[in-house]
Amino acid sequence: MELYVLIIIVLAILLPILYLLYLIFSCPPSPTTSTTTLKGRKAYVVKKINPWDISGKVKLVHGNKVWSATADSEIERGTKVKIVKSKGVHVVVEKDR
């Protein structure tokens, strides 16, 4: 009978510790993206950008995120751009110099 009590106590102590370790090591934190983290970043146009239209697409140079984009002027596919600001789910870009 004493062995069963000992096993229950050990399990009661170890299970919460193991669960916390699982939570810490199994789920990497999701990356955060905000207006300040995108501004100034470099990207390439992967779909032509038309003025005042968010159908254009850009892909960040460092990373694999693709964003809907707009600009003040037409920008062709393959052009390197800089993110000026973000507005909701799209970014405003300009040609990189």
Image (cartoon, rainbow, N blue to C red):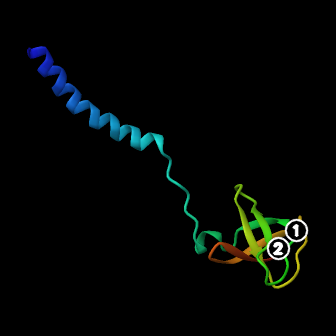
Crowding near the residue tagged with mark 2, few <14, some 14–19, many ≥20 C-alpha atoms within 10 Å: few
71 above or below 24?
below
How far apart in space, not on screen, are marks 2 and 1 (Cα)?
8 Å
Q: Earlier in the sequence, mark 2 or mark 1?
A: 1
For the point 53% across and 55% down, the residue is: 30
Q: Closer to the observer: label 2 or label 1?
A: 1
User: Residue 35: x, y in percent?
Assistant: 60, 74
| SS assignment at label 2 | loop
For the point 20% across and 26% down, the residue is: 10
Mark 1 sits on what residue?
A: 79
For the point 75% across and 67% down, the residue is: 42
32 above or below 28?
below
Amino acid type, residue under disc 1 in the picture: Thr
Amino acid type, residue under disc 2 in the picture: Asp
- Give the label on residue 32, or none: none
Mark 2 sits on what residue?
A: 96
For the point 14% across and 18% down, the residue is: 4
Mark 2 and mark 1 in contact? Answer it, CB < 8 Å.
yes
